[in-house]
Image (cartoon, rainbow, N blue to C red):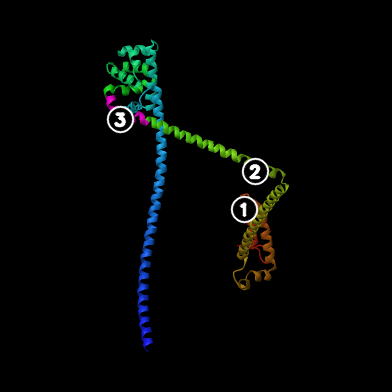
Amino acid sequence: MAKRTVIGRLSAILSLSNKAFNAGLAKSGGKLRKFGKLAKGVGAVVGALGGLVVGSAVALGMFVKAHVKALEAQVKFGQRLGIAIDRLQGLHVAAKLAGVDIQQLNIGMQRMGRRVAEAAQGLGEAQGALKELGLDAKVLSRLSIDRQFLAIADAMGAVKTRGDQVRLTFKLFDSEGVSVINMLDMGAERLGRIMQFAQKIGATIDQDTARGVSRTAEALTMAQVAWEGMKNVIAVAFMPHIESIALSFAKWVSDSDTMKANIKDIAGELLDTAKSIGNVFATIDKLFGWFAETGKNLNWMKSVMPSGGKLAAFGPAAFLMDNDSATSRIEAKTQYMADLVPQLRQGIPMAPHQMEHLRSFDNMTPQGAAVSR
């Protein structure tokens, strides 16, 4: 009895413990499920952010590459003319404000520098223009081209008429002078302020940055050359295999009589199939024609049957059986209508005598004599 009591108590204790354990397990499972959903959502967000980062990195790389190329072109041009890159870019900003095409400005300054140098040697057509502006060609030639441009802009302000300004700028800048004159109108002082403003807002780069641009552009060029070299290596490595495959295919086509025969057989079967399909369509067309002619004949038979009496009660079969002449009339009328078909298909209407002859079949008595109506 005591043992049963102890066992009962142990069972009750284990049962309570089991309930608590199961409840805790269920509660933990709910939390785990919530955590799983949260982790899934976080994973989606992380994946989206990852895609955004990768896409942004690619776009940024393409932007940097394109801009480095553009900066390199400016650096190279400044080096050719001996103009500091920040001053060249400052003049480009002034050109945009004046509505002057940057390419036209670059070409105009290049020609101006050459003509000033020629004038310093007592050569070229710019000699007279510089004297008229009150500028010494030898002194001017010792300045950088951007400073020559500012000096000419300052002197151009003293020219009284627009026509003389156009004439002088044409001699100094050639055909680009007509557009560059809009910048010269700004004068040296305003052009200098614009160049300083461009430096402050970061529209220009300094010489150290210019050297970095050159290095980066060279690195990009080397990478492009390396990629071209890799393509050469890949092509050379695969050429023997491609050659072998191409020759094998050509030999197979030229030597394979079985393949050629099979192609001919397939073509022949396709042609036979096409002919069979055409025959089927022709047969269907004939059937439709037969149905149409049969329908016309039945309608005509209906029209010639008496409306009452024995024949009306038993239908067309009784009429044919009861009147031997009716069969003859149907055959005669059908034959006459068949003779008219070629004429009607050509669009030629029936003549009055043909229509009268056709009606005569309906007016015939069972003995074959026509009746008047």
When asked about the image quadrant of residue 237, the answer is: top right
For the residues labelled 1 and 3, the Cα–Cα distance comes to 106 Å
Image coordinates of residue 274 in percent, x first then y, are: 66, 52
Q: Amino acid at mark 3?
A: Gln
Looking at the rendered image, the quarter that the C terminus falls into is bottom right
Which mark sits nearer the N-terminus, 3 or 2? 3
Q: Which residue is mark 1?
A: 352
Which mark sits nearer the N-terminus, 2 or 1? 2
Q: Amino acid at mark 2?
A: Ile
Q: Which mark is residue 245?
A: 2
Q: Which mark is residue 237?
A: none
For residue 239, side relative to residue 82 (left or right): right
For the residues labelled 3 and 2, the Cα–Cα distance comes to 62 Å
Outermost residue on the top side: it is 122
For the residues labelled 2 and 1, the Cα–Cα distance comes to 81 Å
Q: Is residue 113 magenta?
A: no
Q: Which residues are magenta?
A: 190-209
Above or below 239: residue 190:
above
Depth check, mark 1 against mark 3: the one in front is 3
Image coordinates of residue 255 in percent, x first then y, are: 72, 44
Above or below 118: residue 240:
below
Looking at the rendered image, the quarter that the N terminus falls into is bottom left
Q: Amino acid at mark 1?
A: Pro
Q: Which residue is mark 3?
A: 199
- Disc tally is 3
Q: Residue at x 36, y 31 (%)?
A: 209
